Amino acid sequence: MGAGKTTVGEILSELTALPQIDIDSEIIAEQGCPVSDIFEQKGEQGFRDLEHQKLKEVLQKKAIISTGGGIVLRPENREVLKSFSPVIYLKTDPAIFLERLEGDTTRPLVQEKTPAEIRAIFEPRIQLYEETADFIIETDELNQAEVAAAILKVLAEQ
C-alpha cells in the first residue's frame, strides 16, 4: 500500500508500449463498486478469491501488471507470481507509505487504524514480498518516474 505500484505501472506502460493492467482496478470494474464495498459485502476472503482469479487471468497477457499489496498473503498467489517473472517489489519504508496513505479513504484495511496497526498489517508481508520478488527496488528516495527508470535498468541488465 502506498508504494506507487499503479502509477509506476502506468509510467512503465507508456515507456514500453505494453498495456498496463491493475488487478484492483480490473476487480472494481467487474464488480461495479470500490474495493471497500467488496470487503464490506464479501469480506476479505471474498475479495482475495476475486484477486486470485484475476491474477491467473491477467498473467496470461503480455502486460505491465500491478497487484494489490495483499496479493502475497496466499501461497498460491506467490507461486503463480514466481512462475511469471520478473516480479518486482517496490520496497517502501513504513514511515513513507504511512505518510502517503494519510487521508486515503479507498483502502479498507487501513480505515480507522492507527499507524501501529497499519505497520502490524504490513510488516508480516515484507518477507513474503522479498521471497516472491525477482528484483527489489527501494522507493523511499525516488519519485515514481525514477522508480520506473530503475525497473527498466534492472530488467535491461538481466
Image (cartoon, rainbow, N blue to C red):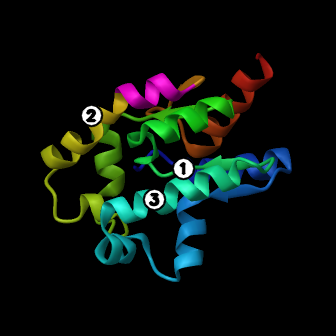
In the rendered structure, the answer to whether residue 22 lies left or right of residue 14 reads left
Asked whether 58 falls inside the magenta stretch, the response is: no
Which secondary structure, mark 3?
helix
> Tag 2: residue type?
Glu
Residue ID for mark 3 = 49
Q: Is residue 101 above or below residue 72?
A: below
User: Residue 54: which quarter of the image?
Assistant: bottom right
Q: Look at discs 3 and 1 and give the one toward the viewer.
A: 3
Q: Residue at x 44, y 40 (%)?
A: 72
Numbered label attached to residue 67: 1
Residue 11 percent coordinates (x, y): 70, 50
Q: Say whether disc 1 or disc 2 marks the residue closer to the N-terminus.
A: 1
Residue 69 percent coordinates (x, y): 43, 47
Question: Label 2 crowding class (10 Å Cα cut-off): few <14, some 14-19, many 20+?
Answer: few
The front one of 35 and 9 is 35
Which secondary structure, mark 1?
loop
Compute the Cα span from label 3 to label 1.
14 Å
Is there any visible trace of residue 4 in the rendered image?
A: yes
> Tag 1: residue type?
Thr
Write the start and end of the magenta stretch as one range: 127-133
Compute the Cα span from label 1 to label 2.
18 Å
Q: Look at discs 3 and 2 and give the one toward the viewer.
A: 3
Q: Is residue 114 above or below residue 83?
A: below
Which secondary structure, mark 2?
helix
User: Marks 2 and 1: in contact by CB < 8 Å?
Assistant: no
